[in-house]
Image (cartoon, grey):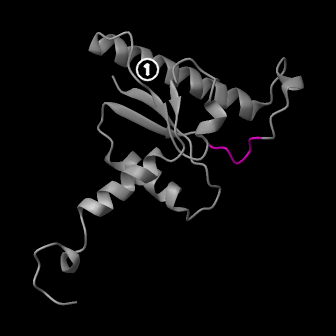
Amino acid sequence: MARDVAVLIGSLRKDSLNRKLAHAMMEIAPSSLKLEEVPIIDLPLYNPDQDNAPLAPWTALRQARERYEGLVARIRKEFGRKSMKTVATGGLAPLFDGATPAIERVDPHLTLYGLRLIAERNPPAGKRKGNSRKA
C-alpha cells in the first residue's frame, strides 16, 4: 500500500526551481510513496474568523496535514519508535510551525544546506582536487 505524502511548493512560478525539484522527486519516488502536490495557488490569506466555515482551499490544506500526521504516526510505529525527529523545510515550513504536533522542528533552509553539501562534495570534473587538467 502506497503512503500519501503531501508536497507543498512555495513558488507559484511555473518554471521555478522548487517546482522542478518537487516534480523530479515525484518521478523518482519509490512505489511505496504516493507524492501529491497540494496546490497553494488558490489559497486565500488566512482569516481566523473563517475557521468555523473554512474555504475549500484551506480545507484541502488541512486534509493534507492530516494525511501527513497519519504518515508520521505509521512510520514511527513501523520503526517501533515513539519519538522521531520530524523537520519541516522549505519556504512554506514556517506556516506549519505549531500547526501540527507531527512537526517537531522547522528549518526553512535545510534543503538548501543539503543541496550545498551535495555541490561541495561533487565539484565539476575540471575543479576536483588532484586533477591536473587545466581549465
Q: Residue at x 47, y 58 (%)?
A: 20
In the image, residue 86 lies at what x, y percent?
A: 44, 26
In the image, residue 45 lies at what x, y percent?
A: 81, 40
Q: Give the farthest residue toward the bottom.
A: 134
Query: Which quadrant holds residue 131?
Result: bottom left
Query: Which quadrant holds residue 93?
Result: top right
Q: Which residue is under mark 1?
A: 72
Q: Is residue 107 magenta?
A: no
Q: Residue at x 50, y 47 (%)?
A: 109
- Looking at the rendered image, the quarter that the C terminus falls into is bottom left
Question: As shown in the figure, which amino acid type bears the numbered disc 1?
Answer: Val
Q: Main secondary structure of the magenta part?
A: loop
Q: Residue at x 33, y 42 (%)?
A: 29
Query: Which quadrant holds residue 43?
Result: top right
Q: Residue at x 52, y 22 (%)?
A: 67
Is residue 110 left or right of 132 when viewed as pictured?
Answer: right
Task: Identify whether 22 is placed above or below 61.
Answer: below
- Looking at the rendered image, the quarter that the N terminus falls into is top left
**Region in magenta:** 39-43
* Residue nearest the observer in this picture, 95 or 21: 95
* Residue nearest the observer in this picture, 87 or 41: 87
Q: Is residue 41 magenta?
A: yes
In the image, residue 110 lies at what x, y percent?
A: 45, 45
